[in-house]
Image: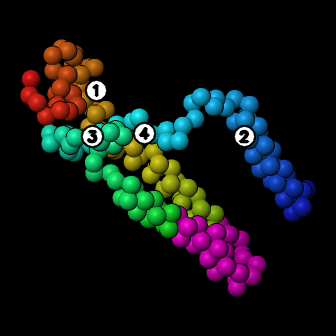
Amino acid sequence: LGETTPMLVGNVVSITAGALITLVGSWVWADPARVTANPFEALALIDLADAPARRPASSSGRSEGSTSSQLAAVRHWVLVRSVQGTVVLIVICPLATVTWGVISPSLFSLWTSLALLWAIAAAVTVIGLPIQESLQHVSNSLYYALAGFDGERSSDMYGDVDGASR
């Protein structure tokens, strides 16, 4: 009980089984009719900050502000930062602790506490940021749900999207 080899084999088997189940499931239940070269092409982007100005949309449904070169630059930035974070967390941090040798129980407790705090911070960020972004809309929705919604003031709820006053 608690030997390294059975735990390693169990982890490899579970990861492999999960990958196989995902691959087979996506092959079996895939709908080729729904697969397109660019699944987001039909979606129109709405930029509420620019709603009163109302930029014209191009033929692809994207606003003129999001060119492919800008999207490529953002993709590159995200990719570089992801790789940097991965290298720091998976390579540099463990290598920095190799010189410590066998760590004491108190140091192990410190590391597990840090890992727990890291997980809590990640969970709060992942759950909290979307809530913070939509807090105004949620509060407006709750206000109209509790105070009564008269139907004629629908533009007041989310703001007048096209900039025209009614």
Question: Which residues are the magenta region?
Answer: 82-110
* Dot placed on the residue nearer the N-terminal end, 1 or 3: 3
* Dot placed on the residue nearer the N-terminal end, 2 or 3: 2
SS at badge 2: helix
* Dot placed on the residue nearer the N-terminal end, 1 or 2: 2
**Alpha carbon separation for disc pair 1 and 2:** 38 Å
Residue that numbered label 1 is attached to: 141
Position of the N terminus by quadrant: bottom right
- Tag 4 near tag 3, CB within 8 Å: no
**Alpha carbon separation for disc pair 4 and 1:** 30 Å
**Alpha carbon separation for disc pair 4 and 3:** 12 Å
Q: Amino acid at mark 3?
A: Ala
- Tag 1 near tag 2, CB within 8 Å: no
Q: Does the magenta portion include 149?
A: no
* Dot placed on the residue nearer the N-terminal end, 4 or 1: 4
112 vs 17: above or below? below
Report the mark closest to the observer, 1 or 3. 3
Residue for point 60% across, 71% down: 87
**Mark on residue 22?**
2
Residue 146 shown left or right of residue 94 in the figure? left
SS at badge 4: loop
Residue for point 20% across, 15% down: 151
- Tag 2 near tag 3, CB within 8 Å: no
Residue that numbered label 3 is attached to: 57
Q: Does the magenta portion include 87?
A: yes
**Mark on residue 118?**
none
Report the mark closest to the observer, 2 or 3. 3
**Whether residue 6 is visible:** yes
User: Where, by quadrant of the figure, is residue 140 drawn?
Assistant: top left
**Mark on residue 41?**
4
SS at badge 1: helix
Majority secondary structure of magenta residues: helix
